[in-house]
Amino acid sequence: MTDDKDWLESVFRRKAYEETPLRVLEAEGGAAVGKNENYLSNLTKMKVTVLLGSGKTKKRTVMIKNRHTGAFMKNFTSKLGVFMREITMYRDILPRMADLMEECGDTDEPMWAKCYDVRLYDRLVLEDLTASGYKMGNKTEELSLESCLLVVKNLAKFHGLSHVLLKRSEIPLEIFRYNVWKNLEEGYNAQNMSSYTKLLRAIGTWGDDWEDVRQRFEKAMPTLTERMMQAMEPVPDDFVVLNHGDCWTNNLMFRHAPDSECPVSMRFVDFQLCFTGPPSYDLEYLLVSTVRPEFYTKNWDLIVRTYCDALKSTMLKLNYEGPVPDFDAMKQLMKRTHIYYLFNAIGITPVVMGKSEDIPDIEEALMKEHEARLRGEEGNTWNLFDDLKGPAKMVVQFALRDAVDNGLI
């Protein structure tokens, strides 16, 4: 028996050596996504030829995620602390989630890309998911129902795993206690007020039918950001989770069955905005950024029920004995925190649903906006409301009407 063990050990060592890259022979890289497709970092796809221990050569691809080098965005993302969050996620939290899955006998594939290396705190080297057949959707098109349901099932699993880790104190609250925007303090409110003012002006051009909405929104503007930040805070007895924080089309990758549009697997990418709070945040963010109002209205119940069923299933697998929100509880939670939908409709849909060529260069635009505010002026470089159109306009208008109907403004 001992001889068999020693022999197997030598087999595994030899196999591992033969498959180990010893040297990079060639390397070339280019932008992994188009301009204005990735906002808080620079993403490069590297194609490399490596020499293996076996003497063979092999071509591989990896994704290199770097902090912005432009002065304004470098400073902006440093204040937000997005790279510290994402590196902590890939280095510490996601491996703990994987261990938890193994602990409960869950043999499903992980919901994220492999991380090969990190550099504190400005670089990650990640698996190229496209090499495994994963594709990013088109942000100007809404998710299919099948894709949306697959995402919420995975969100429920991600949330469930995080809830157990939070109970075990294995997620550092000094990093993830608050959302990143809290780090901007008063600057964030000023930035949002500038956006609200531009939207208010745009509403005034939509016709007489919008005058009541315009007046209501104007009254709500001074406290809207504060109300949003308060809604992101959990209250006693909430089922607190680690939210992904940025569930929009470009951060969701799908693999489809051969010759089919039916998704069979998905991966979350970009863990820069994770924070602890009510699970309704990710659901509202997903629904406001990836689907149209008609889809939202028609499928809301099904989507939330699917989430709740998947969450219950996850917690049972994890042998969790505490309370888990059912459909009725989740409905009440989403009603309490429904301001998420309006706030993110205003804040992100012009970007995440708009055509990339219509979006100004983010480094230049935000720098000019910031300089204008310092002079006490209203900057107009980052103004996506004067020419709001297509799906983004539909969602913003729906969110405003919805906010009136639900007494939010």
Image (tube, rainbow, N blue to C red):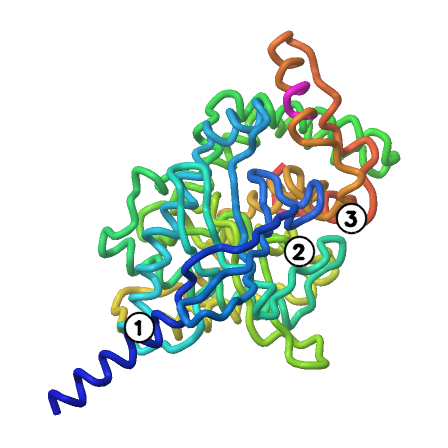
Residue lying farthest bottom? 1
Residue 335 visible, this orientation? no
Q: Which mark is residue 176?
A: none
Q: Which residue is mark 2?
A: 290
Q: Secondary structure at mark 1?
A: helix
Q: Earlier in the sequence, mark 3 or mark 2?
A: 2
The part of the image, by quadrant, that contains residue 266 is bottom right
In the image, is residue 327 part of the stretch drawn in magenta?
Answer: no
The part of the image, by quadrant, that contains residue 357 is top right
Q: Secondary structure at mark 3?
A: helix
Q: Look at label 2 and name its amino acid.
A: Thr
Q: Which residue is mark 3?
A: 394
Span colored in magenta: 365-369
Distance of label 3 from label 2 (alpha carbons): 12 Å
Neighbor class of circle 1 (other Cα within 10 Å; few <14, some 14-19, many 20+) is few
Q: Which residue is mark 1?
A: 102
Distance of label 1 from label 2 (alpha carbons): 31 Å
Neighbor class of circle 2 (other Cα within 10 Å; few <14, some 14-19, many 20+) is many
Neighbor class of circle 3 (other Cα within 10 Å; few <14, some 14-19, many 20+) is some
Q: Is residue 108 above or below residue 31?
A: below
Distance of label 3 from label 1 (alpha carbons): 43 Å
Q: Residue at x 55, y 72 (%)?
A: 265
Q: Is residue 161 above or below residue 202?
A: below
